Image (cartoon, rainbow, N blue to C red):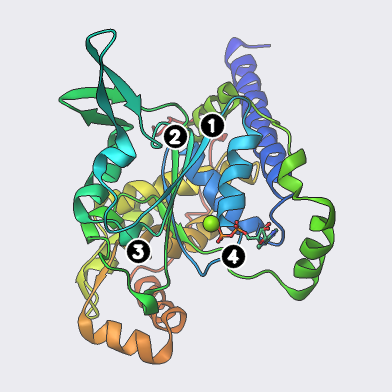
Amino acid sequence: MEPTEAARLEGSDRFQRAAALGDRFLENIETVVHGKHEEIKLVLAALVCGGHVLFEDVPGTAKTVLARAIAQSIEGATPSRIQCTPDLQPTDVTGLSIYNQREREFEFRPGPIFANVVLVDEVNRAMPKTQSALLEAMAEHQVTVDGQTRVLPDPFLLIATENPIEYEGTFPLPEAQLDRFFLKTALGYPSTDEELQIVDEQRHGHPLRWLQPVISVEDVHVMREAVTTVYVDGLLQRWIVELVRATRALDEVAVGASVRGSLALERAARAWALLDHRPYVVPEDIEWLFAPVLLHRIVFRPTFLAEARRVGWIEAVAGIAETCFAAAPRPVPDSSEEPPPPERLPVHP
Ligand SMILES: Nc1ncnc2c1ncn2[C@@H]1O[C@H](COP(=O)(O)OP(=O)(O)O)[C@@H](O)[C@H]1O
Ligand SMILES: [Mg+2]
């Protein structure tokens, strides 16, 4: 066997192993959170891309349970929770240095941000100064306290929740901050049958109590590495950029999605392909991810927001997605050209 062929097979073997880790992870979490397969997959996509998630949801939809289930599924990973209130200080998040009388020196007491899976509840109730501290942590995977920079654990996944738009918080997140979230989704209520199952299941305690780790931190790195090897056709890459640019040209929009949006959509599509055991991206990945990856990055005009309040948010943004897909239609593949095997193609980090 040629060495290149051996390398190709080894590469595809590694890819399939990474995809299988994704399955195992997802299945484990689904033993405690029911009927939310696609939503959990989105959160895992964010995790393997090193991104963070914003949930806009009503209370009691398993957000806390999901965050804890993710942490518990990774061997040695730690969870933490931050409840935002208007008087929450940045140091309540990051931690602070305290003078130790006996040792006669300052020692650092890490705040709740120093965990692998951090749930930040009602992020729009925190004051801007505290939101900024969270932002730095999310973007840089580090925090600076008393002039000293400290690195956060790896993996680091932040899941923030906010109340639905109708119950606007005290301090709505500025758009620069929203752009830092890799994607936004909602869990929502389960179906009647699922809710019955949940009630039944919890008679003797919460299923989280028995949830065991199924992957290691190293496995998360294996999945991350596999995501970088997923092939994205040039036509699809261009389409991603065109779709993001289309959000900037809409009448309803004051500021469209930034370049971060293009980066995130391409990365998310690669992660989605991995979780589907596919070493290449298909147009459906991009179509499916458009809303969760891009919509929260758009600043809408007040007239659109008023309209959205009238007809409902879902209805209103469906129109936005439609307009973008009309402006940037799905590319037609050049069928005369046989695509080369994905493993041999250049990697897009
Ligand atoms: N889809 C679901 N699958 C499993 N349990 C659920 C689901 N939705 C809600 N629950 C249950 O409802 C309760 C509240 O969930 P919790 O995570 O505390 O809600 P919140 O979204 O407010 O953080 C938990 O016992 C949780 O297991
Ligand atoms: Mg909760």
Q: Is residue 307 visible?
A: yes
Mark 2 crowdedness (10 Å alpha carbons): few <14, some 14-19, many ≥20 = many
Mark toward the start of the polypeptide (1 vs 2):
1
**Residue holding disc 1:** 78
Of label 3 and label 1, which has the lower sequence position?
A: 1
Q: Amino acid at mark 4?
A: Gly
Cα distance in 3D space between marks 2 and 4 = 24 Å
Q: Residue furthest front?
A: 102
Read off the residue under disc 2.
Answer: 156
Query: Callout 3: 10 Å neighbours few (<14), some, many (20+)?
Result: many
- Residue drawn at x 47%, y 57% as measured from the top left: 286
From the image, which quarter does the N terminus lie in? top right
Q: Secondary structure at mark 1?
A: loop
What type is the residue that disc 1 sits on?
A: Thr
Precedes in sequence: disc 4 or disc 1: 4
- Judging by the rendered image, the residue that carries numbered circle 3 is 296
Mark 4 vs 3: CB contact within 8 A: no
Q: Where 220 sits versus 208, above or below?
A: above
